[in-house]
Image (tube, coloured by chain):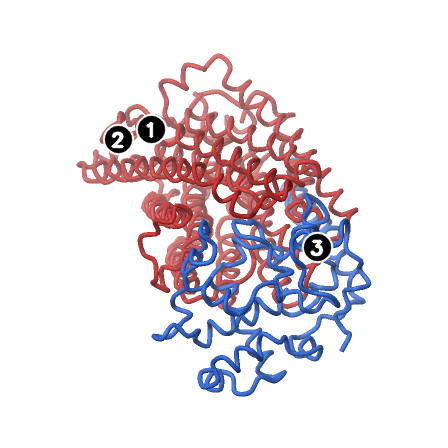
Chain colours: A blue, B red
Amino acid sequence: MFESKTGIFLVAGLGFFALAFLVMGLLPWLIYRGEPILTVDDMVQKGIVPEFVELAERFPKQFAQYFGKPDEKSFAAAIRRGHQLYVGEACWHCHSQQVRPVSNETLRWGPVSHAREYQNELQMPVLFGTRRVGPDLAREAGRRTNDWHIAHFFKPRAVAPLSVMPEYTWFFDANGVPNRDGMALITYMQWLGSWLDHYPYYQGEGPAGPGPAEKVNMRGI
Amino acid sequence: MASQAHAVPASESHEIRGLVDTRIVAFYLVTGLIFLLISMLAGFLFSMQFLQHYPLKGIALFSPGKWRLIHTNGVAYGFIANIFLGMMHWAIPRMTLRPVFDKRLSWFIYVAWQAIVLATVVGLLAGQAQALEWGETPIWVDPVAQLGLILVAINFLPPIIRAPGPMYVTNWYFIAALVWTPLVYAMGSFIPQYFFAGAPAGAIGGMFIHDLVGLFVTPLGWGMMYYSVPILLKKPVWSHGLSLIGFWGLAFFYPLTGIHHFLFSPIPMFLQYGAVISTIAIEFVVTTVIINFFMTLRGSGDMLRSNIPIRWYYVGMVNYFITCLQCSFQTTLTFQKIIHFTDWVVGHAHLVMFGVFGFWLIGFVVQILPRACGKAGWYSNSINEWVFWLTSSSMAVMFVDLMIAGLVQGYQWRDLAPWEASLKASTPFWLVRTVAGTAMIVAQFMFAYNIVKTLAAKPVAAGAAARPAAGGAQPGLAPA
């Protein structure tokens, strides 16, 4: 078997791969299959974040043109587009969306990430992240104002003098007002973590140790 | 090796009998190197962002993040895949004494694969990346790439299956890789996009990243070592038993390791432990393979000095041992607390993909390209020496630099230093990284110059193409 064509083809090629897939891939799916995969439309039922309404009030003309009224439908559209940009611009290669229970991350960012938070269509594939050049964004909602994000996306060093983030000037119109993509990305930022019962968390205010899982109530409307 | 020794007739007639399509080999090798240059320039561009001197800022098409994607995907699908395809076109007909399934299919695959890589680049620039690390190939390219990988298996498996008698080690790895690669691609590209969300999608994503290394690049890489090293050293591999342990150990443990990319994540903890244990087990398997190859080298150590491909191969193996040893530590929860999300991992990835497989592939090009093009030898062996020393020394600098940077970042984060403190502390390391990377790029351009000059030389007569000078000497498969 160890040197035969069928042995290598069937056992090493197909067999061991299938074994690993069953144990390491299918098993976690079986464990979590009771948790439904929510759509963005399900999730926005919990409410619109105040920052989205604030964008509509601050830039009424542009907002109306891009999104219409700030309701659940336009909120969902903005989140979807923001997520698309977050993936397309590879934001997720310098920012994680995963608070770990170690390395004082709960003190810096807030409660530990819970499996339920990822059971939705915007985590297909999941955006745990791989590198933190900039901070984690899983608890970003409400931590900073829209103004801060507008300045930061346009010229990160204006608000964070040592930042190495690129200047995303193409998310703004000629007058320096965020365009549709800019507003969508800011909305996405202000939404990340807004599903928690309590937010925002600031450094030093988070619960010490692993976060309470029961607080993560994705379906609470 | 010994088992095939008598079955293989004198080597040089293979090309004459039209078994090996040397033209497609040359096309793959040169195309792969062009993609290497593009990918490296993309990496250089991205690294300049960290130094606040990004040369093309404010242009959406040159968004640094997008060029980071081109860097990693270009290396995987443009550089590594292309040269491996050329390598298999060279090695499989020689080992099996049979042509590939269909030579027209070979050329179709060649053209289709370049179209797939270019479509990926265009898609990434258009912001259509898929959120799967190292598989950011846009979702509309995925089915085409999947089909391409299946065609590759259809083209290369028949000669291996049809050849009578026992198989040589290389072909164990090739069969396995040709089965695994389409499976890995299908699993990673489709399941977390359309079926699984969240933590289970993370488990699949982790497996995809690691299987792409472990079940596509690694088996083809080791298959290539088992093919090339005995030829250049003119002796069989030291221990057949260790070859068996190496292959079956890799086949069993490697697919189980993927979840180690997401430790302390919401993926069930017992599976994280399982992935950690498998990863450490791999290190033992790797040690047996390394012992096997260094015992093979014993008595021929002088070849490291005189033969450039052998030097690329063995330095790559040393890097392989270092990177696997590092991995067996960094995969533990103790190390993960500090080094996860830091530049340590970036250094590790570069040492594996460039310091090991990049070195091996460059070594293969040095060994084969002049022969595949019917040239007497390299235009300049001293340029090849420079390429080796510049590349390998700057690789070592980059690796150590990023490893230390990762520790600095990790401890600062744990100690709750302001975020910007970690940026300030990282800047010198990022500068060294860019300088080391620049040296690597310069070396590859020197290599490109050497190739252009070599290809411009007059071809030798068909019969005399057999014995090129230093670096290219390869007496075919049969030990004398």
Quick check: A111 left or right of B427? right
Quick check: A166 left or right of B377? right
The kind of residue tagged 3 is: Glu
The kind of residue tagged 1 is: Gly
Residue at 59% in and 27% down: B289
Identity of the residue furthest to the top in this view: B299
Mark 1: few/some/many CA within 10 Å (<14, 14-19, 20+): many
Q: Mark 2 lies on which chain?
A: B
In depth, the one of B222 and B209 nearer the eye is: B209
On-image quarter of the C terminus of chain B: top left
Q: Judge whether B275 appears above or below B394 on screen.
A: below
Residue at the disc numbered 3: A205
The kind of residue tagged 2 is: Trp
Q: Judge whether B355 appears above or below A148 on screen.
A: above
In depth, the one of A157 and B15 nearer the eye is: A157
Are discs 2 and 1 located on one and the same chain?
yes
- Residue B282, image x, y percentages: 66, 34
Question: Label 1, label 3: how many angstroms apart (C-alpha)?
Answer: 65 Å
Question: Label 2, label 1: how many angstroms apart (C-alpha)?
Answer: 8 Å
Q: Which mark is residue B472?
A: 1
